[in-house]
């Protein structure tokens, strides 16, 4: 064994440069154009946020996107906390067949997220099976904007998410699909 002190690793986020320049501009412009076209054609878009939003500390930018578009938002399991669960457009956690509503059964109507009260989705004084609402709202959306998604077995309810690629805009630090 060697008896020597170890160097202390640096603390804080690892800041890596994002490639920029002429080689990336046509591809980025094309991706933005296709995403804008899909969003402009959609009538029931939704935003789904995930863990890379937290990892790259872009919660403020996500909130600005949600506020400016008015789209409802859900989170994948690892993205829990990427948006305030009291936000009026937040509808719950999405994990395919393992989706969950943020509040427990028995919670009064006045405590439900504003977006669900406004949509008249709920009509009794106790919470219904809202996991079905969250799952259906996302899976039936004509455009799903996945922001910072890590599509792993844990995060996708053991790969039970059902978001067709042709209706999906996936945005993360490494790629835009």
Image (cartoon, rainbow, N blue to C red):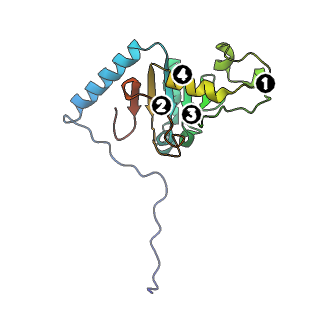
Measure the C-alpha gap from mark 4 to mark 3: 20 Å
Residue 90, compared with residue 122, is above or below; it is below
In this figure, which residue is indicated by the disc labeled 3? 94
Mark 3, secondary structure of its residue? loop
Task: Give residue 67's mark.
Answer: 4
Give the residue displayed 50% in from the left and 21% down from the top. 140
Examine the image and state in which quarter residue 171 appears: top left
* Kind of element beneath mark 2: loop
Q: Residues within 10 Å of mark 1 (few under 14, many from 20)?
A: some
Q: Earlier in the sequence, mark 1 or mark 3?
A: 3
Write down the quadrant of residue 86 in the picture.
top right
Q: Position of residue 28 (x, y in %)?
A: 28, 30
Label 1 belongs to which residue? Answer: 126
Q: CA distance from mark 2 to mark 3?
A: 10 Å
Q: Quadrant of the C terminus?
A: top left
Pointers 2 and 1 in contact (C-beta within 8 Å) = no
The mark closer to the camera, 4 or 3, is: 3
Say which residue label 2 marks.
Answer: 162
Q: Is residue 25 left or right of residue 144?
A: left
Please tell me how many numbered marks the rendered image carries.
4
Of label 4 and label 2, which has the lower sequence position? 4
Q: How far separated are the C-alphas under marks 4 and 1? A: 28 Å
Of labels 2 and 1, earlier in sequence is 1
């Amino acid at each position: 064994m060697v008896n020597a002190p170890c160097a202390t690793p640096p603390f804080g986020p690892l800041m890596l440069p994002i490639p920029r320049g002429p080689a990336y501009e046509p591809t980025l412009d094309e991706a933005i154009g296709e995403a804008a076209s899909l969003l402009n054609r959609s009538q029931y878009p939704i935003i789904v946020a995930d863990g890379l939003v937290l990892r790259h500390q872009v919660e403020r930018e996500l909130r600005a996107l949600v506020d400016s578009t008015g789209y409802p938002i859900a989170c994948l399991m690892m993205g829990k906390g990427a948006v305030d669960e009291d936000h009026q457009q937040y509808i719950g956690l999405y994990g395919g067949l393992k989706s969950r509503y943020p509040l427990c059964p028995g919670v009064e109507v006045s405590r439900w997220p504003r977006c669900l009260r406004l949509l008249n989705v709920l009509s009794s004084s106790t919470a219904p099976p809202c996991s079905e609402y969250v799952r259906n709202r996302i899976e039936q959306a004509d455009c799903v904007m996945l922001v910072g998604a890590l599509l792993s077995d844990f995060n996708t309810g053991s790969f039970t998410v059902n978001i067709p690629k042709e209706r999906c805009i996936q945005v993360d630090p490494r790629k835009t699909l």
